[in-house]
Image: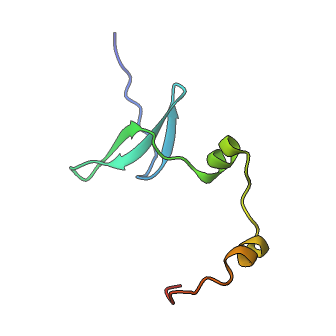
Amino acid sequence: MAVAVKRLDVNVGDLVEIDGREYDVVSDKAGGAALEPAITVFSPELHRRHGTRPISQEEFDERFGDVPADGEG
């Protein structure tokens, strides 16, 4: 049985889905890229799992406005 090689236009850090499975694109030791089973979870997925939502800037300031800044940003 012949296997067709497909080229993917992806970059390191991308998340790809192949046959319903998710894979992270990671750098390999030879300077190229490889696919590994996905361990990356993005915030929209976390919010969906936990029934939460992102907080607004106003909510952030109310909760963390008194925390001293470290001056790095």
Q: Quadrant of residue 20?
A: top right
Q: Is residue 49 above or below residue 69?
A: above
Tell me the colour scheme of the image.
rainbow
Residue drawn at x 52%, y 25% is 19
**Residue lying farthest bottom?**
71
Identified at 72% across, 78% down, the residue is: 61
Is residue 22 rendered to the left or right of residue 48? left
Percent position of residue 57, x then y: 74, 73
Q: From the viewer's perspective, is residue 15 above or below residue 62?
A: above
* Vertical arrangement, residue 5 with respect to residue 58, above or below: above
Check the image and name the residue furthest to the top: 1
Instruction: Where is residue 68? Give x, y as percent.
Output: 58, 87
- Say whether residue 70 is left or right of residue 55: left
Foreground pick, 66 / 39 = 66
Q: In the displayed structure, would residue 62 be above or below residue 6?
A: below
Front position in the image: 65 or 3: 65
Among the 4 quarters of the image, the one containing residue 69:
bottom right
Q: For residue 1, what is the image quadrant?
A: top left
Q: Residue at x 73, y 45 (%)?
A: 51
x, y percent for residue 52: 73, 51
